[in-house]
Image: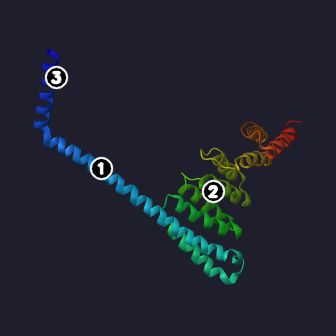
Amino acid sequence: MQNENTQTTVTDKINEFIKRNRTGIYIFLGAIVFLFTGLIVYLSLNSYFQRKATAEVEELNSKYIELRLLLSDDHYNDDVDALIKDLTTFAKGKTSYAGARAWTIIAQIHSEKKEWPHAEEAWRNAAKAGVKTYLAPVAFFNAAVAAENQGNPEDAIELLEKCVSYKLDFPSAPRAQFSIGRLNEQLGNYSAAAEAYRAVLVNWPNIEIWVNLAQSRLAVIEE
């Protein structure tokens, strides 16, 4: 009997609380429904715009493929410049896969034309735009190649270090790590070179080609 009275009292208190505060409760529940609906709309729109942007950048990539074999032909300079302009306009302000993809195409054009300063800048922009995508470590690696081709090994090392430290998997990471050692060795930084080569052995012990190369360079440095 006492339990029944206690339960009745608790139920009455809950009902009384709801009656006194029903306006606030309805507002609270309405806000939750509104926020949830807004989240669904936002996710749907975001997905739509991402698909749209991806389709647009792939259309631009198709134009690049058509021009790729003609990049060295001066007769097509205007077409190439127009494509770079369209890609740049598209890429600016986009921090997504599509933006990174556009910068990557720009970088590829400049790399194939051996315009290394422009290539490095575009690769860096690709890494920045695609910071949460697999394109970022690829972009850092290629930016390092462009920096090295300009005779800037220190910048190349910095970019390669960003590449190998990236959280996303990058198949060429052991090559990038070995390149850090190679560049340090060229600069005469033998302790840093040896450390970089040892990192290859520790982090990628099953990648035979890079392990063998790292071991051969360590043997030369430490002899």
Q: Which residue is mark 1?
A: 35
Tell me the amino acid under the disc marked 2. Answer: Ala
Q: Secondary structure at mark 2?
A: helix
Q: Quadrant of residue 203?
A: top right
Question: Is 55 placed left or right of 41 in the picture?
Answer: right
Question: Where is residue 124 shown, x and y percent of the image?
Answer: 60, 58
Question: Where is residue 155 shown, x and y percent of the image?
Answer: 67, 52
- Return the disc, 2 or 1, that comes first in the chain's sequence: 1
- Which disc number belongs to residue 46? none
Q: Residue furthest front?
A: 1
Question: Quarter holding the C terminus?
Answer: top right
Tag nearer the camera, 3 or 1: 3
Circles 2, 1 touching at the beta carbon (< 8 Å): no
Q: Is residue 93 visible?
A: no
Residue drawn at (53%, 73%) of the image: 86
Q: Secondary structure at mark 3?
A: helix
Q: Nearer the viewer, residue 204 or 140?
A: 204
Distance of label 3 from label 1 (alpha carbons): 35 Å
Q: Is residue 223 above or below residue 123?
A: above
- Return the disc, 3 or 2, that comes first in the chain's sequence: 3
Q: Quadrant of residue 165?
A: top right
Q: Nearer the viewer, residue 180 or 86?
A: 86
Circles 3, 2 touching at the beta carbon (< 8 Å): no
Q: Which residue is mark 3?
A: 7
